[in-house]
């Protein structure tokens, strides 16, 4: 079976393999499993109430993604993300988000536009009232709406993965040095460009938005060793 086939089969969230894969992947990204920690098949299988086979298959897929290292005759270990990994993810994501915003400006539906406007409004409300957790939720929701508005399943899938990979370091970035204020302003400007059907402007603003997030991480010296 080729890599693409494995990806499709394993990541089907409704299959047993997909559920096991998504659970382990989420536990790695969320920090439940730390960098260099061994991922014991028997223990994970017991926690999830499954046999070791879907766990083993999930670990192989996660190895292809670069999240896990499988050492012959030893076991599977969490690789985590290096500084370069995080940098590369943000740079790639900045380009893809720009393309996504351009396509959203062309294809967004009235319902999606309304949802994006409401998201920006709620973000401003929660920011003003110091509701950090709710603000983070709206921040993610804004990007989800834009991904859907691109009307590209492939682009949405890629961006959702990249967005998820840096979730923890992104949240730390938003919380630091009033980055949340700038994030909200940037979201509003992207939303207005999309509403105006100005794809070129939306692309430029979305691209800069992600690069600004990356710069803030460097400025704040955010620790990513365990991410």
Image (spheres, rainbow, N blue to C red):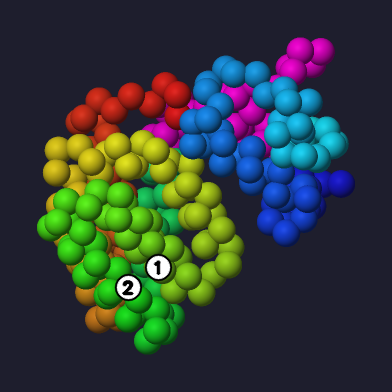
Residue 203, horizontal then vertical, whole percent: 32, 64
Position of 189 relative to 75 (above/below): below
Position of 166 relative to 150 (above/below): above
Position of 148 relative to 85 (above/below): below
Q: Quadrant of residue 109?
A: bottom left
Q: Which residues are magenta?
A: 59-88
Label 2: which residue?
A: 116
Mark number for residue 146? Answer: 1
Of the pair 126 and 77, the residue shown nearer to us: 126
> Alpha-carbon neighbours of circle 2 within 10 Å: few (<14), some, or many (≥20)?
many
Q: Quadrant of residue 188?
A: bottom left
Residue 208, horizontal then vertical, whole percent: 26, 53
Residue extending farthest top: 74
Residue 80, horizontal then vertical, whole percent: 52, 27
Q: Residue at x 53, y 49 (%)?
A: 161
Position of 113 relative to 146 (above/below): below
* Foreground disc of the pair 1, 2: 2
Residue extending farthest bottom: 110
Query: What secondary structure is marked by label 1?
Result: helix
Query: What secondary structure is marked by label 2?
Result: helix
Q: Is residue 218 left or right of residue 160?
A: left
Q: Is residue 176 left or right of residue 94?
A: left
> Alpha-carbon neighbours of circle 1 within 10 Å: few (<14), some, or many (≥20)?
many
Looking at the rendered image, the quarter that the C terminus falls into is top left
Q: Is 58 colored magenta in this rendering? A: no
Residue 145, horizontal then vertical, whole percent: 41, 68
State if disc 2 and disc 1 touch (CB < 8 Å).
yes
Q: Residue at x 30, y 55 (%)?
A: 134
- Which mark sits nearer the N-terminus, 1 or 2? 2
Q: Quadrant of residue 169?
A: top left
Q: Residue at x 48, y 70 (%)?
A: 148
């Amino acid at each position: 079976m080729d890599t693409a086939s494995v990806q499709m089969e394993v990541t089907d969230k409704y299959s047993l393999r997909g559920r096991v894969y998504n659970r382990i992947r989420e536990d790695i990204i969320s920090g439940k499993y730390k960098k260099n920690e061994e991922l014991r098949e028997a223990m994970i299988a017991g926690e999830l109430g499954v046999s070791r086979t879907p766990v083993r298959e999930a670990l192989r897929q996660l190895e292809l993604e670069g999240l896990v290292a499988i050492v012959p005759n030893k076991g599977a270990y969490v690789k985590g993300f290096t500084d370069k990994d995080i940098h590369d993810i943000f740079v790639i994501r900045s380009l893809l988000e720009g393309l996504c915003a351009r396509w959203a400006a062309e294809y967004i539906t009235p319902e999606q536009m309304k949802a994006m406007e409401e998201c920006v409004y709620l973000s401003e409300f929660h920011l003003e009232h110091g509701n950090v957790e709710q603000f983070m939720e709206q921040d993610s929701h804004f990007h989800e709406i834009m991904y859907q508005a691109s009307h590209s399943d492939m682009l949405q899938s890629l961006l959702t993965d990249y967005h998820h990979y840096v979730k923890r370091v992104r949240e730390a970035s938003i919380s630091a040095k009033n980055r949340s204020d700038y994030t909200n302003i940037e979201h509003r400007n992207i939303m207005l460009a999309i509403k105006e059907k100005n794809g070129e402007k939306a692309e430029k603003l979305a691209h800069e938005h992600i690069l600004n997030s990356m710069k803030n991480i460097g400025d704040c010296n955010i620790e990513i060793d365990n991410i």
